[in-house]
Amino acid sequence: MKTINELQDEVINEFSDFDDWMDKYQLLIDLGNEQEPLDEKYKTEQNLIDGCQSRVWLQADWAEGKIIFQAESDALIVKGIIALLIKVLSGHTPDEILDADLYFIDRIGLKEHLSPTRSNGLLAMVKQMRMYALAFKAKEAEVKG
């Protein structure tokens, strides 16, 4: 299993192949479209992320000490953004997720090429994923406790 930083470097390399932001947006849309659709049972109010302009559902599951994320959005670019976050963070421990410095967001120029509302949405997605990590970490401590 690759580390979060190795996965971030892969994303940076993938995006560095393109100079034009239209191509990068297309890559984001393709990544979103490649993602498995989220099971309808997870498209609930409680899985909706607050702070996103479009609707984004995030499901987190616990498997063998790691968090597995699944998500879907009704907006193409947002679907791509959450796909990137899942690619980087899913399958890692709560501590790895909480300690991660998500430098790829700045390195691929994502923040500066998103509208302010999308940028806020991106921060809300990261925050929600970290909240799940905190919750699972607390639950794990309880079990061990």
Image: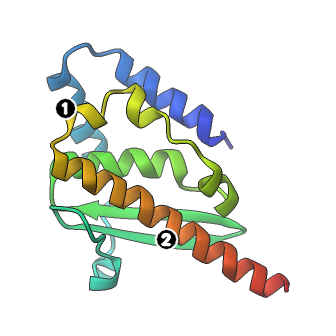
- Figure quadrant of the N terminus: top right
Residue 74 appears left or right of 93: left
Q: What kind of element bears circle 1?
A: helix
Indicate which disc, 1 or 2, sits on the residue closer to the N terminus.
1
> Where 88 sits versus 13, above or below?
below
Residue nearer the viewer, 49 or 91: 49
Residue 24 appears left or right of 99: left
Dot 2: few (<14), some (14–19), or many (≥20) neighbours within 10 Å?
A: some
Residue 49 appears left or right of 100: left
**Which quadrant holds residue 22?**
top left
> Where 51 sits versus 29, above or below?
below
- Looking at numbered disc 2 in the image, what kind of residue is underneath it? Ala
* Residue under the point 22% across and 62% down: 52
Is residue 34 visible in the rendered image? The answer is no
Q: Name the residue carrying label 1.
A: 26
> Where 57 sits versus 11, above or below?
below
The answer for how far apart the CA atoms under marks 1 and 2 are is 27 Å
Q: Position of residue 20 (x, y in %)?
A: 19, 16
Q: Position of residue 41 (x, y in %)?
A: 32, 83
Do labels 1 and 2 touch, CB within 8 Å?
A: no
Q: Position of residue 110 (x, y in %)?
A: 30, 34
Residue 24 appears left or right of 96: left
Q: What kind of element bears circle 2?
A: strand
- Looking at numbered disc 1 in the image, what kind of residue is underneath it? Gln
Residue nearer the viewer, 69 or 54: 54
* Residue under the point 28% across and 62% down: 72
* Residue under the point 36% across and 59% down: 125
Is residue 110 visible in the rendered image? The answer is yes
Q: Name the residue carrying label 2.
A: 60
Q: Pick out the residue farthest to the right.
A: 145
Residue nearer the viewer, 77 or 137: 137
